[in-house]
Image (cartoon, rainbow, N blue to C red):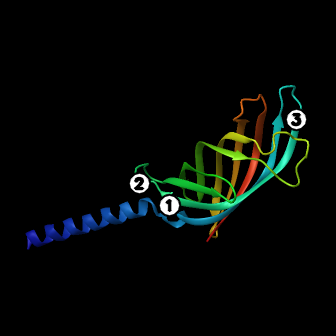
Amino acid sequence: MNNRKSTLTVRLLAMCLMLLCVACNTDVHKIAGDYSYKQSGLVTFTDEEGQATSILANKQGQMNILEDKKGGKGAIIVTFNEMNGGAYTCNGTIKGDSIFFAPHEFSTRFSSADSVQELAQLGKVYTVQGTGRGVFRNEMIIMEESWIGHPEDGSLVRMFANKITLLAEEN
């Protein structure tokens, strides 16, 4: 009887540990998936003489959030596939309903029919460092990102955006 009780106790303990491990990443599991996203925000370009020009940048595409099994509790890998543009990845963390993008780098072009036509920077490739944070609500992610960057052609123009809004809706 005592041996039977020990076996039952060990089984119960093992089941509790398994449930605890599964519960560790429930935040990730509820957010992981495929999303369609739109980004929009004011991007300012400052040339070598200090002249600043701003444009409204709009981007859209597909985003995928995957659990990063090597990154610890709440760790994710986010992939971006911009429509008519490039693709890149970044790491992040999920804590409850909050999502955080780690600092990451990507390349992009800025072009828009709404933009100032004389702005020579449109169409140039920029290296951009970004970071962001947001919330997950009702199968939708609402993020605010900050970007800083420079053109890859070596010119002294700098770009800055302190509030790029990313809206992502689960597919």
Q: Earlier in the sequence, mark 1 or mark 2?
A: 1
Residue 161, given in percent of the width and then of the height, sits at 77, 43
Instruction: Tell me, for residue 28, which label it has, or none.
Output: 1
x and y percentages locating residue 12 in the rendered image: 25, 68
Numbered disc in front, either 1 or 2 = 2
Query: 10 Å neighbourhood of mark 2: few (<14), some, or many (≥20)?
Result: few
Label 3 neighbourhood size at 10 Å, few (<14), some (14-19), many (20+)?
few
Residue picked out by circle 2:
69
Q: CA distance from mark 2 to mark 3?
A: 43 Å
Q: Which badge, 2 or 3, is on the more N-terminal residue? A: 3
Amino acid at pointer 2? Lys
- Residue drawn at (48%, 65%) of the image: 29
- Does 160 sit above or below residue 112? above
Q: In the rendered image of this protein, does residue 136 appear above or below residue 152?
A: below
Q: Is residue 25 left or right of residue 3?
A: right
Front residue (pair 14, 134) = 134
> Visible in this render: residue 167?
no
Instruction: Examine the rendered structure and indicate whether residue 88 appears above or below residue 157.
Output: below
Judged from the image, the secondary structure of the residue bearing numbered disc 3 is strand
Confirm or deny contact between disc 2 and disc 3 (CB under 8 A).
no
The residue to which callout 3 is attached is 52
- Report the quarter where the C terminus lies: bottom right
* Quarter of the figure that contains the N terminus: bottom left
Foreground tag (2 vs 3)? 3
Residue type pointed to by label 1: Val
Measured as percent of width and height from the top left, residue 7 is found at 15, 69
